[in-house]
Image (cartoon, rainbow, N blue to C red):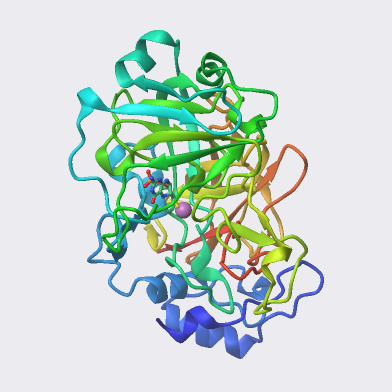
């Protein structure tokens, strides 16, 4: 990838920044092909996002739809402008597989088994029994890969180089895990619920489990934690876990087990593959970028941090013959809600508050929009920043470097040219 991506991001905190020189600004303007509006407020050494876009995907004009990061396992992400729908449709949903998608699904004989130390005896339910014995609920739920944003960490970390698009918010229908746990007779010693899916290990070894993560019993007992059999009112697409999926909103998507066959109700923290350090863990205390962190100092990721996307317009867009533009997107905050979304046209010097809609339900993302005015001709950047209900805002530069590159919730920025 281009050297541009590896550039150290400058300190953008207001007050401490050094501004770019006039000659530097003129050179950047030449490279971009237009004057940079508010350029005198641009920090020194800052790389305009228009270069990031080119660096991340030099073929971006040819990639009209999803961006394939890896073809075995099949991993694709969604560019932000394709996440514009309030409810993410299946064809615009990122896909992350750690193993091979199950090839044949025998829907009539599909069984969910519940076992583990916190049950007196295993309980087996067919799909039909699940659907008929328990009440169904529908929730719109944010599912974001813990590694979304990994591509921006410096020094780089291994894994799929997700940029912004490993997130979705579809409408999931299913039964509450808590109702099923109650039916199964879960005991007081329950601490964790681990999942097992029907996907196959890449090695071809049928005894090897691809991934088996889970959630603490408190999260399992929340109303919105579903054993889902529908997505957006239809059967769940095969890639997203047909015929049954554990769906846990607001937590790293790796806990939402696809092709669900078994739940282990544990009397201790679940210990399946990819539960152990360093998978889906971050340093319990902040570390220096590049530092080696011993496994014992790595803590399991739970609720995801506050984040937002600008889904309209598409970065690189051209505004012709007008000055007003209504921009929009979504914001979400793990287990919390979003209190405020702001946008900036001057590299974070000033912020304008956007209109923010309430979530469809708890753990759904929230839609926002703002009318902005671009008076001068030239290159603009639009930055968006969300603040959660506890008052925590997104950072403007990659936060808390960590060895596996999780939880990057940096502000999303887009480039717009007014001609
Ligand atoms: N059985 C199973 N469930 C899984 C995975 C997997 O590889 N196998 N990947 C997890 C990870 S890491 C992510 S990010 C999400 C991706 O969900 P999606 O492909 O439906 O968008 O599924 C999670 N559930
Ligand atoms: Mo993930």
Q: From the viewer's perspective, is residue 151 above or below residue 232? A: below
Q: From the viewer's perspective, is residue 93 above or below residue 395? A: above
Residue 109 on image: x %, y %: 23, 25
Q: From the viewer's perspective, is residue 288 above or below residue 341? A: below
Residue 29 visible here = yes
Q: Which of 69/393 is in front?
A: 69
On screen, residue 128 versus residue 349, left or right, reads left
Residue 104 on image: x %, y %: 18, 40
Residue 22 on image: x %, y %: 63, 86
Residue at image location 71% in from the left, 57% down from the top: 350
Q: Quadrant of the C terminus?
A: bottom left
Residue at image location 51% in from the left, 88% down from the top: 27
Residue at image location 59% in from the left, 39% down from the top: 215
Question: Residue 208 falls in which quadrant of the image?
Answer: bottom left
On screen, residue 223 versus residue 235, left or right, reads right
Residue 58 on image: x %, y %: 32, 75
Residue at the right extreme?
Answer: 15
Q: From the viewer's perspective, is residue 319 above or below residue 216? A: below
On screen, residue 120 versus residue 16, left or right, reads left
Residue 321 visible here = no
Residue at image location 61% in from the left, 29% down from the top: 118
On screen, residue 238 versus residue 38, left or right, reads left
Q: Which of 25/391 is in front?
A: 391
Q: Quadrant of the N terminus?
A: bottom left
């Amino acid at each position: 990838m281009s050297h541009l991506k590896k550039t150290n991001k400058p300190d953008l905190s207001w007050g401490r920044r050094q501004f770019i020189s006039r000659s530097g600004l003129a050179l950047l303007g030449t490279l971009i092909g237009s004057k940079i509006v508010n350029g005198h407020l641009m920090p020194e050494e800052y790389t305009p996002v228009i270069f990031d876009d080119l660096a991340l995907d030099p073929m971006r004009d040819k990639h009209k739809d999803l961006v394939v990061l890896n073809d075995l396992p099949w991993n694709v992400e969604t560019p932000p402008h394709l996440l514009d729908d309030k409810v993410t449709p299946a064809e615009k949903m990122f896909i992350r597989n750690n193993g091979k998608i199950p090839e044949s699904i025998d829907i009539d004989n599909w069984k969910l088994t519940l076992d583990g130390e916190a049950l007196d005896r295993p309980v087996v339910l067919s799909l039909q029994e699940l659907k008929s014995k328990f009440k169904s609920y529908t929730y719109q739920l944010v599912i974001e890969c813990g590694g979304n944003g990994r591509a921006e960490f410096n020094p780089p970390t291994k894994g799929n180089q997700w940029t912004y698009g490993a997130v979705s918010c579809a409408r999931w229908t299913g039964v509450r895990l808590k109702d099923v746990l109650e039916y199964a007779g879960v005991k007081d010693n329950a601490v964790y619920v681990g999942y097992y899916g029907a996907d196959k290990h890449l090695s071809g070894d049928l005894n090897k489990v691809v991934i088996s993560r889970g959630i603490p019993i408190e999260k399992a007992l929340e109303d919105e934690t579903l054993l889902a059999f529908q997505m957006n009112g239809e059967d769940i697409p095969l890639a997203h876990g047909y015929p049954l999926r554990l769906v846990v909103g607001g937590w790293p998507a790796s806990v939402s087990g696809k092709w669900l066959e078994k739940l282990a109700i544990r009397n201790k923290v679940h210990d399946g593959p990819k539960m152990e350090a360093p998978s889906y863990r971050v340093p319990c205390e902040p570390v220096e970028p590049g530092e080696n962190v011993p496994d014992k100092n790595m803590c399991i990721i739970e609720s995801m941090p506050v984040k937002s996307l600008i889904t309209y317009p598409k970065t690189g867009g051209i505004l012709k013959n007008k000055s007003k533009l209504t921009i929009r997107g979504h914001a979400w905050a793990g287990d919390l809600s979003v209190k405020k979304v702001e946008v900036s046209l001057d590299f974070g010097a000033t912020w304008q508050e956007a209109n923010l809609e309430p979530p469809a339900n708890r753990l759904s993302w929230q839609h926002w929009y703002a009318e902005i005015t671009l008076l001068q001709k030239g290159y603009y950047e639009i930055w968006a920043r969300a603040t959660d209900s506890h008052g925590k805002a997104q950072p403007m530069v990659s936060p808390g470097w960590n060895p596996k590159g999780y939880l990057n919730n940096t502000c999303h920025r887009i480039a717009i040219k007014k001609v």
